[in-house]
Structures are given as structure tokens and as C-alpha cells.
Image: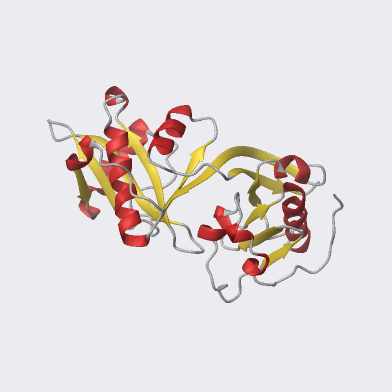
Amino acid sequence: MQATTLVPRTSDLFSQGLERRTGAALLRFGAARPRPAGRISWSGDGAAAWLDDSRGHVWSVGEPVAAAGLILRAAQGFPERVREFTGPRGTDALVGRHLTVTGRVEWIFRWTVEEPAVHPAEHRVVVLGDEHHDELLAFLNRHSPAHSTGPGSADVSLWAAIRGADGELVACGALSSLRDSGAPLMASVATDARRRGQGLGAGLTSWLTRHAVRRHGFCTLWQLADNAPAERLYSRLGYRNEDPCVSARIGSS
């Protein structure tokens, strides 16, 4: 793979039909169609990439070699604006041959268009309002300090939770959205460490999935690649596992 300083292509990301291929769900669900005005994107050679300018983040799908080439093109064309990227597994090593790559995290972008079977704990799920944000934040800080989305985030459409017999929170989670497309994204699911193994997380995620599928026709989520319990849970709920990704920060070589 050879680095290039060519002017970025701006053809529509969907012109290659990549969104219909296995492994390109991040494009299918994550990139708005039609293309938003001003979106900077690149496509060609079996890959596509687009820039989330507000975050300095390049998203890419397709063949790893071609996707890495588009990430390099973005980084070289906009060196002051591109700070991080997400691509198919393996792009980090390829980009790392040319630029400094740090903070690698392996993810799986998962999705479903089907409602799961009803879980017995779903009847305990309640929707929480703004008045519960402090309670939610304290719970997340205690049981999931690395949560991706916090109370008050503009991307969140609802927070749901399960309470114990004493009224205290024992599980919570949010329906957020992917920034470019607005697609529903399940996020910040957490269970009280003392109550794990009781089906609370399964009931909550089943409820959130059903809510999203009924409202939007599908639901998406990010799963850490090495999270075996989450892998089993989301597979039981019917989430597809076809999109292994890697995210990393990028700098000058």
C-alpha cells in the first residue's frame, strides 16, 4: 500500500453498493443517505470512508488495504483535522506503517432488524426522565466507569432502568444515536456488580432492542471484542456479528 496526497474523492459513498455487503453495516446504518451537505468522503477500490469533522474522526468500511489507503489519504489531505479513525480490523497495522497509531481498541459493530424473544425481566423496565440524571450518573460511575454515554447527552432519546425491591437502581441503559445518520444505538448498559447473573442486563437490553426495532426498524450497538459475556448476550438477542472494527488515534510519523 502506498501513501498518496491526491485530492480526496467526494463521490457518494453508496455508489459502489458497499452498504449491501457483509462487513459494511457501519456504512449502511452509520452514514446518512443522501449525503449531508458538506460531508467529506472518499470511495473506491472496494472501500469507503467519511469524515466526522466535529470529532476529527474518519470512519471507513471495506477491504482493509483499501480502507487504510483512504484513511491515509484523509490524514494527509487534512493533517490538522484528522485525529482518529475507525476501520475494518487490520487497518490499524496498515496505517501504522506510515503514521503513528496509538490507543488501539478492537470493537464489533453489531445490529439487528428483528425483535428478540420476550425476556421475563422486561416487565420490570421503566423509563427515566431528566430528574433521574444525577442518580443515573452516580450508578454508572460506580458500576461502569468507562461508560460511553452519560446522562444529559444530546444524542440520547431515552434512559431505561430496572429497580430493586428497595427502589435502588440495579441496571440501566440508553438509546442513543449514531451522529451522521441518527440510527438508534444502544449504549451505556450497566448492571449492579452485586446483581450480575440474575438476567437484569438481558431483560434491559431485550427491552431496549424491542423499543428501537419497533420505532426505527433496527437497532445497533458497539461491543468490545474481548467482552465474552456481552458476546453471548447480544448473540442470543439476534445481533449480527459481521463487522469487526478497530479504532485508534492518529498522528504524524
Judged from this view, the residue extending furthest toward the left is: 166
Q: Which residue is depicted at the point 28% across and 30% down? A: 199
Residue farthest along the right direction in this orientation: 2
Up the image or down, 12 lies above or below 242; here it is below
Q: At x 64% / y 51%, what residue is drawn?
A: 85
Q: Residue 56: x and y, percent? A: 62, 58
Asked whether, in this view, residue 104 is left or right of residue 160, the answer is right
Instruction: From the viewer's perspective, tell me whether residue 79 is left or right of residue 165.
Output: right
In front of the other: 201 or 156:
201
166 relative to 194, above or below: below
Name the residue: 61% across, 74% down: 38
- Counting from the top left corner in percent of width and height, residue 151 is at 33, 49
Left or right side of 129 for 205:
right
Can you give x and y, in whole percent of width and height, for residue 128 in the image? 22, 50
Residue 51, image x, y percentages: 63, 62
How many numbered marks are there? 0
Q: Nearer the viewer, residue 200 or 148?
A: 200
**Residue sitting at 66 percent across and 69 percent down?**
15
Question: What colouring style does the render use?
Answer: secondary structure
